[in-house]
Image (spheres, rainbow, N blue to C red):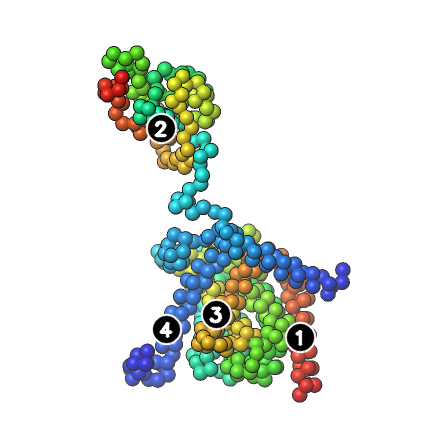
């Protein structure tokens, strides 16, 4: 790795080499992560339904998603005749880019983060809002009523749930006195979930909704909207949406672990392993919830966000501010 | 109802739900890994087959056509031949069209030599209708009576 860095640095210059290596490393890990998470999801679903899940390809079906990916790669890329062509082609790429940027901002150790920004949390909040634009582009450009409905629902949902997520994150920022993710982790002598349990619950519900997962999977509700915004996408373009969804789960799970579970901190194991384990713990809980709860109706979804989560998060923020103000 | 109480009850019901699925997740699976594992078919009545008697090592069909006569769906196609110096006929052709068989079992009841039975097969499959015709003599090979090896 050191020699490779040196070689690249001499060829491309220091900054470019750093970016190239970082992108390759993060992309590689994210690809592995998506293959692993889809396999894990199917295993969790199977065992909750008293089945084994995939068992045929590889030991305990571990290579099943790889086989599925190869199948998707070989499928025809279909574009509807009346589609808005460039928007349609751009959407699957754009849906993935913000998640990749956010992934590079998560600190994985006291000195290790691909990009370390003083206002990292704000950048993450801004970037993760971009995913919804790509989803709406996909829904709109497909020229399909189900896709448009799915896209519209997705926009309304993410706009609504972004607010409680940010309010919950803000109460952590108030305690840590910093927007830098590294400083937030370093400020946690014990995990913030113990001081801010309500914010942690609101944050968890919010990220479940933001990743469009059950019980908030209304943008792609199979029984109502066929496939939702990705109805008209096939082959690898469809896989890109899948890829983005699971990457988003990892990134938001890691963000939750950073804000509430102490990030890379933990005994014995190295820091990067701790943050991955904590993120996978959050994801496992999301999967567990997916195979337990029925889907919400759209009006229930909206009233849940605006009438319950936002007041709760706001009240929690005010109480946190007051307590901190009086305590010093 | 009091809205605070409603929220608390709602949250509690979510935890109860997670508890139920969580318990199921750690219980043993109830499915079989077919075709690696197969169910117990010992009480299953599948397509009709000929009995192999341990004394002779072969079936005892005398081509009397009793089964063909009683069959409500006309499934059978049987031909027989009398071996040299024997009083009993032997079947030379015994075909059962499973696509019309309703597994009623009348042929099993009527068989004078008790040489018909339900098989334990449960997963026969075919691509064309003519493949559903089962040749019941196929598992037996050369007939020892007709070959003169048994009297």
Co-location on one chain, circles 2 and 1: no
Q: Quadrant of the C terminus of chain A?
A: bottom right
Seen at 44% across and 55% down, the residue is: A80
Looking at the image, is mark 2 or mark 1 nearer the viewer? 2
> Which of the two discs, 3 and 4, labels the residue nearer the N terminus?
4
Would you say residue A103 is visible in this rendering? no
User: Label 4's element?
Assistant: helix
The chain that hosts pointer 1 is A
Disc 1 designates what residue? A316
Mark 4, residue position: A24
Q: Nearer the viewer, residue A122 or A214?
A: A214
Distance from Cα at disc 4 to Cα at disc 1? 40 Å
Q: Are marks 4 and 1 in contact (CB under 8 Å)?
A: no
Residue A191 shows in this picture: yes
Mark number for residue B134?
Answer: 2
Foreground residue among A139 and A64: A64
Q: Position of residue A151 (x, y in %)?
A: 54, 61
Report which residue position mark 3 lands on: A277
| Nearer to us in this view, A289 or A215 | A289
Characterize the local packing of mark 4: few (<14), some (14-19) or many (20 or more) Cα atoms within 10 angstroms: few
A132 to the left or right of B92: right
Label 2 to label 3: alpha-carbon separation: 58 Å
Which numbered disc flags the more N-terminal residue, 4 or 1? Answer: 4
Q: Are marks 3 and 1 on the same chain?
A: yes
Label 3: how many Cα within 10 Å (few below 14, some 14–19, many 20+): some
Q: Which of labels 3 and 4 is toward the front?
A: 3
Query: Alpha-carbon distance for marks 3 and 1?
Result: 28 Å
Does dot 3 land on a helix, a strand or a loop?
Answer: helix
């Amino acid at each position: 790795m050191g020699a490779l860095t040196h070689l690249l640095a001499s060829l491309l210059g220091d900054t470019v080499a750093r970016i190239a290596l970082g992108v390759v490393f993060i992309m590689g890990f994210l690809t592995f992560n998506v293959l692993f998470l889809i396999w894990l999801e199917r295993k969790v679903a199977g065992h909750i339904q008293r089945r084994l899940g995939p068992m045929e390809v590889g030991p305990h079906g571990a290579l099943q998603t790889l086989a599925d990916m190869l199948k998707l790669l070989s499928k025809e890329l279909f574009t509807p005749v009346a589609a808005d062509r460039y928007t349609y082609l751009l959407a699957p790429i754009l849906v993935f880019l913000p998640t990749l940027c956010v992934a590079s901002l998560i600190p994985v150790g006291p000195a290790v983060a691909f990009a370390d920004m003083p206002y990292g949390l704000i950048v993450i909040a801004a970037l993760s809002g971009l995913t919804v634009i790509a989803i709406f582009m996909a829904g709109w450009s497909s020229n399909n009523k189900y896709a448009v409905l799915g896209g519209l629902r997705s926009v309304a949902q993410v706009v609504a749930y972004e607010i409680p997520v940010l309010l919950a994150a803000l109460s952590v920022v108030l305690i840590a006195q910093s927007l830098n993710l590294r400083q937030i982790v370093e400020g946690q002598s014990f995990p913030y979930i113990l001081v801010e349990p309500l914010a942690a619950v609101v944050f968890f519900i919010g990220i479940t909704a933001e990743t469009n997962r059950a019980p908030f999977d209304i943008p792609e509700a199979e029984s109502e909207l066929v496939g939702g915004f990705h109805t008209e996408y096939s082959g690898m373009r469809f896989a890109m949406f899948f890829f983005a969804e699971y990457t988003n789960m990892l990134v938001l799970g890691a963000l939750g672990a950073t804000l509430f579970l102490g990030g890379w901190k933990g005994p014995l194991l190295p820091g990067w392993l701790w943050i991955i384990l904590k993120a996978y713990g959050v994801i496992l809980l999301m999967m567990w919830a997916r195979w337990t709860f029925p889907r919400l109706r759209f009006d229930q979804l909206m009233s849940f966000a605006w009438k319950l989560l936002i007041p709760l998060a706001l009240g929690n923020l005010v109480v946190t501010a007051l307590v901190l103000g009086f305590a010093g | 109802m009091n809205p605070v109480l409603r929220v608390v009850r709602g949250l509690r019901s979510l935890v109860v739900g997670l508890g139920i699925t969580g318990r199921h997740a750690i219980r043993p699976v109830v499915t079989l890994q077919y075709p690696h594992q197969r169910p117990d078919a010992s009480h299953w009545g599948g397509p009709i087959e000929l009995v192999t008697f341990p004394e002779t090592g072969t079936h005892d069909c005398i081509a009397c056509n009793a089964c063909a006569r009683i069959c409500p769906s006309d499934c059978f196609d049987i031909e027989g031949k009398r071996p040299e110096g024997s009083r009993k006929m032997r079947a030379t052709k015994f075909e059962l069209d499973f696509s019309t068989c309703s597994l009623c079992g009348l042929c099993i009841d009527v068989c004078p030599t008790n040489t018909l039975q339900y098989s334990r097969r449960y997963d026969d499959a075919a691509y064309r209708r003519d493949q559903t015709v089962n040749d019941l003599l196929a598992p037996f090979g050369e007939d020892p009576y007709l070959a003169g090896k048994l009297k």
